């Protein structure tokens, strides 16, 4: 994976962000989900790199990127803070305008980049995600049953202790044969590191403490995503089953919305990279 890509650490004010960059053409920023690192994008990055310059960072708080400083409200782990950090990273790489693609928790940072830094984003792709506010306002018994970790991770101390007691028991769906040995080894290192586990959990605490407030402020002010937006979801995951048509939710946030489901489980970049790369590429104006 990542054939011809360069591994870099880019320094910004908050700390260093680890990333891989490769390919040629218009820049595309790929943001991973929990508990992955940028390595989850390897197969997709290789498919996109003949047509695009592909940038795959570890999100702040994940992998080997900097761990945001702790505060009582987790504001340094907010998607607003991460969006600002990622825009600074892209500027440091020489990219002032780019497409951004986010999956799972990465979708939340991608959404916040498009909302807070509209001048820097020309296209947005959301995969298996909704604004935090939409999740919380729709939380019912099915959400509590299947996505209980949102509320467990919001608690102090105990989530980290539970995960670190046996990381592979907690993240029991990780498989090297499914995700690739390099990606597996990378995420295994991440989930075994107490500092990284804390950083990843703070990402969820920020959702409950502050991210939904930012979403509500945007909604109350009738702010919407300015750029064309593609919403994708995994048909063998439960986003659509719990919430219904994701497009019906996203259409209240985006002026120019497109979207469809992909035949995959939740980790679509690993499970169906070809379909995902084709969807991204076509939306960005390049048929593969």
Image (cartoon, rainbow, N blue to C red):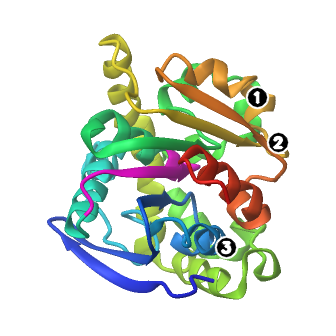
Residue 6 x %, y %:
42, 86
Mark 3 lies on a secondary structure that is: helix
Residue 279 x %, y %:
67, 49
Distance, label 1 to label 3, CA atoms, is 29 Å
Q: Quadrant of the C terminus?
A: bottom right
Q: Which residues are magenta?
A: 95-107
For residue 99: magenta? Answer: yes
Q: Nearer the viewer, residue 185 or 236?
A: 236
Residue 102 x %, y %:
52, 51
Residue at which label 2 appears: 235
Residue at which label 3 appears: 43
Q: Is residue 169 above or below residue 262?
A: below
Please state if 242 lies on the left or on the right of 203 as rendered.
Answer: right
For residue 157: magenta? Answer: no
Residue at which label 1 appears: 242
Q: Residue furthest left?
A: 13
Distance, label 2 to label 1, CA atoms, is 12 Å
Q: Residue at x 45, y 59 (%)?
A: 28
Quadrant in which residue 89 is drawn: bottom left
Q: Residue at x 73, y 75 (%)?
A: 179
């Amino acid at each position: 994976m990542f054939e011809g890509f360069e591994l870099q650490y880019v320094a910004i004010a908050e700390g260093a962000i680890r990333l891989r960059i490769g390919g040629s053409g218009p820049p595309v920023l790929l943001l991973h989900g929990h508990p992955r690192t940028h390595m989850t994008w390897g197969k997709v990055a290789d498919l996109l790199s003949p047509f695009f310059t592909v940038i795959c960072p570890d999100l702040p708080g994940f992998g080997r990127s900097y761990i945001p400083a702790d505060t009582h409200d987790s504001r340094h782990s907010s998607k607003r803070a991460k969006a600002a950090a990622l825009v600074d990273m892209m500027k440091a790489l020489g990219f002032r305008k780019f497409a951004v693609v986010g999956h799972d928790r990465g979708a939340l940072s991608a959404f916040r980049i498009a909302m807070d830094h509209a001048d820097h984003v020309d296209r947005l792709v959301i995969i298996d995600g909704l604004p935090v506010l939409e999740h919380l306002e729709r939380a019912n018994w099915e959400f509590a049953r299947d996505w209980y970790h949102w509320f467990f991770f919001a608690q102090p101390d105990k989530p980290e202790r539970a995960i670190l007691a046996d990381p592979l028991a907690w993240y029991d769906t990780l498989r090297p044969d499914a995700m690739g040995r390099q990606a597996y080894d990378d995420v295994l290192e991440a989930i075994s590191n107490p500092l990284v586990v804390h950083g990843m959990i703070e990402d969820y605490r920020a959702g409950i403490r502050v991210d939904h407030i930012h979403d509500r402020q945007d909604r109350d002010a009738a702010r919407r995503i300015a750029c064309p937006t593609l919403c994708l979801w995994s048909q063998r995951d439960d986003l659509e089953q719990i919430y219904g048509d994701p497009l019906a939710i996203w259409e209240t946030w985006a002026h120019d919305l497109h979207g469809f489901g992909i035949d995959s489980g939740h980790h679509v970049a690993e499970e169906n990279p070809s379909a995902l790369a084709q969807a991204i590429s076509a939306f960005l104006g390049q048929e593969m």
